[in-house]
Each structure stands twice: as C-alpha cells, then as structure tokens.
C-alpha cells in the first residue's frame, strides 16, 4: 500500500466529530480550513472574521456558528481541548495568538510563516513553550500527499542521498497591489519559504551552507533576484538551491536515493525515474479530500489526532524559526524587525 493511501485510510477511519474548532479569519485560507473541517466531519466550528459580509455564506450550515468584529471580541472561554486555527494576515498572527492564549486556548495551528522575522519568531516560540500549550505551524506543503508518498519511497530505498531545489518565483505584475511593501520586500520568508520547508522536511534542517545573490531588477525586492547556494543538512545530506526571479523558472524539488530520482514539479505531484535515459513517471497519489486545497485536511487531521500526527508529522514553532532564519540568509534579509 502506498504511503499517501495509508494516511488517507487512517484519516477516513478516525473520528473527528467530537472536536471543537475555532477558525480566526475567513479569507482565502480561512475558507479552506472550514472546508477541511467539514471534510473531516467536525461538528462544532466557530468562524470569526473582522468583516460580517463574508460570513453570510456560512448561514444555514449545521454545526457552524459565526462571529464578526475580529478576534478581540471573543469572550467565551474555550473548551479544554479546543483547537484554534489562526488564518489571519501575517502581521496579526502573533498578536492574535497571544490574545487567544490569554483567553485560555491551549492548542494552536498558526498559518505560516508566523512572523517575517526570525528574531520575533524566536521570542514568540519561547513564550509559547509552556506546559499545556501545543502550537503547530501550518505549512500545508509539508502535509502534501506527494511528500508523504515520497517519504515512503525514501525510507524503503535506504534514505535520501542528495537534494536540489529551485526557488524561482513566477512573478506577477499585480503583486504590488495585492501585498504590502513589507511582505514583498521579504517575499522569500513570506512565500518562497514553502519550497524550503518542503525540501528540508525531507532532508533535515540546514546545518551549514554558503550562497551568493545578485540582481536589482525588482524594485520591491531590493536584496536581489538571483540566489544560488549549497550546503549540508543535519542528516548529513548534501543539498543545493537555485533561484532566478528575473527568468522563467518555477518552484521544484528533486531528491535522490541509491535506486531512483524523484521530482516535485509542480509540488503537488511526485515523479520518479529509475533509469537516467527514460522519462519521468508520475507516481499515483491518494488524497483524502480532493475538493479541499491540498494538504489542508491532512495538517488539520494531524493537529487534532495523535495517531495521524505520528504517521505524518507536523511543523513545530522551532522548525518554523529555523526555516525563517535560513530564508533570511538565503535572500539577504535582516532578522531584526526594527532593522528591516
């Protein structure tokens, strides 16, 4: 049985109906979390949004209650094991988490990257490393069925021998209208970090590395457009990365075992090649809830259910900090928020 199919079957027989979940934010991400919770048949969901208008579409759904006005208006004490999913703009993630902790919440799933600054994230994770608090970072690529499938292959073939990933962004002309200046100036830590997280979830956190950067064609990203480097992970796996935001590449991850080469490109799919002169072959993947954004149902299930979490893992705040710090070095950012 494939690894992704095994995870999907464990999720299918797990009972999530007794969970109570609060979702903060009902934008694009918040909507996907609600879909994921419905797919898992969670029967008690509170959705909190600053604006009342988006919540109207949830009227009439059994088991869903809504509240407008923002998280600051939440007053009720949570249940002992109630999960709160924080799907707010990045600037609100840490303030909301602190507020909800004071309100009594003990289990958190916080949207990536939690903070754009490693120093702020490091301080935050120390505050949340207290008895009784469980906090996970929502990197949905880590819960991709394609990645879960790849782990199964790697384990069966004696482990990963090396890895290469591409961080090239498909730059859009409307980004300056859709995202804040701060977020764009640290786009590598805000968005491109998805690829970093996926690669290093497989090979281990970066241990040592060196890199170079250049380019000045993007006014909103002054630290550069081309980034090339290499290093070794904590699992002693050699890796390299490449990005050229002024060209026409895209995200991708490749890794190798003694028996085959593997490729995620697009990241949602896994391709395998046993003979160098033959074409890549797509590996069949099993997804628990095809109608939900990939990885969302899986990461929510892992947060709610220990058995699922043991099979597929999760992203701790410490790992999120390590990846953000690494991204800062790769892309040439300052780690201190007051010196951004």
Image (cartoon, rainbow, N blue to C red):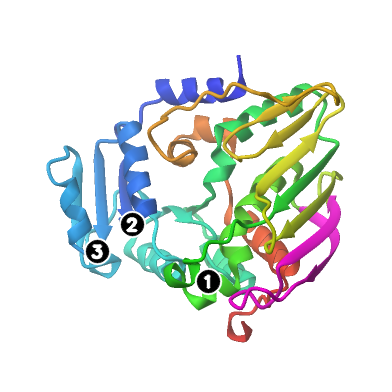
Numbered mark located on residue 74 in the image: 3
Instruction: Give the SS element for disc 2.
Output: loop
Task: Tell whether label 3 touches label 1 (CB within 8 Å).
Answer: no
Other residues around mark 1 within 10 Å, as few (<14) / some (14–19) / many (≥20): some
Query: Which circle marks residue 183 in the picture?
Result: 1
Q: Which residues are magenta?
A: 206-232
Image coordinates of residue 59 in percent, x first then y, are 14, 46
Q: Quadrant of residue 161?
A: top right
User: Closer to the camera: disc 2 or disc 3?
Assistant: 2
Q: Could you give the CA–CA distance between mark 1 and mark 3, rounded to whole angstroms?
A: 28 Å
Q: In the structure shown, which secondary structural element does the residue marked by tag 3 occupy?
A: loop
Q: Earlier in the sequence, mark 2 or mark 3?
A: 2
Above/below status of 291 relative to 53: above
Q: Which mark is residue 27?
A: 2
Given residues 288 and 290, the one toward you in this image is 290
The mark closer to the camera, 1 or 3, is 1
């Amino acid at each position: 049985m494939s690894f992704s199919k095994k995870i999907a079957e464990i999720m299918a027989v797990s009972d999530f109906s007794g969970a109570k979940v609060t979702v903060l934010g009902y934008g694009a991400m918040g909507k996907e979390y609600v879909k994921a919770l419905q797919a898992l048949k969670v029967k008690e969901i509170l959705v909190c949004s600053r604006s009342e208008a988006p919540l109207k579409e949830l009227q009439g759904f059994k088991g869903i209650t809504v509240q407008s006005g923002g998280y600051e208006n939440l007053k009720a004490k949570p249940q002992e094991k109630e999960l709160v999913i924080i799907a707010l703009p990045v600037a609100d993630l840490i303030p909301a988490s602190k507020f909800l902790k004071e309100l009594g919440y003990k289990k958190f799933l916080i949207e990536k990257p939690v903070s754009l600054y490693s120093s702020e994230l490091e301080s935050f994770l120390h505050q949340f490393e207290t008895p009784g608090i469980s906090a996970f970072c929502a990197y949905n690529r880590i819960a991709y069925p394609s990645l879960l499938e790849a782990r199964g292959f790697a384990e069966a073939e004696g482990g990963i021998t090396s890895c290469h990933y591409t961080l090239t962004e498909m730059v859009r002309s409307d980004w300056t209208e859709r995202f804040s200046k701060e977020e764009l100036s640290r786009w590598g830590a805000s968005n491109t970090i998805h690829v970093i997280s996926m690669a290093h979830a497989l090979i281990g956190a970066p241990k040592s590395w060196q890199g170079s950067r250049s380019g000045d064609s993007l006014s909103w990203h002054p630290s550069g457009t081309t980034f090339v480097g290499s290093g070794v992970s904590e699992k002693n796996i050699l890796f390299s990365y490449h990005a050229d935001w002024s060209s026409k590449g895209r995200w991708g991850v490749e890794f190798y075992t003694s028996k085959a080469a593997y490729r995620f490109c697009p990241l949602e799919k896994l391709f395998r090649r046993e003979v160098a002169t033959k074409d890549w072959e797509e590996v069949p993947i099993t997804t628990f809830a095809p109608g939900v954004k990939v990885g969302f149902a899986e990461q929510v299930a892992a947060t709610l259910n220990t058995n699922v979490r043991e099979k597929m893992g999760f992203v701790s705040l410490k790992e999120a900090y390590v990846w953000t710090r690494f991204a800062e070095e790769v892309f040439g950012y300052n780690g201190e928020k007051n010196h951004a």
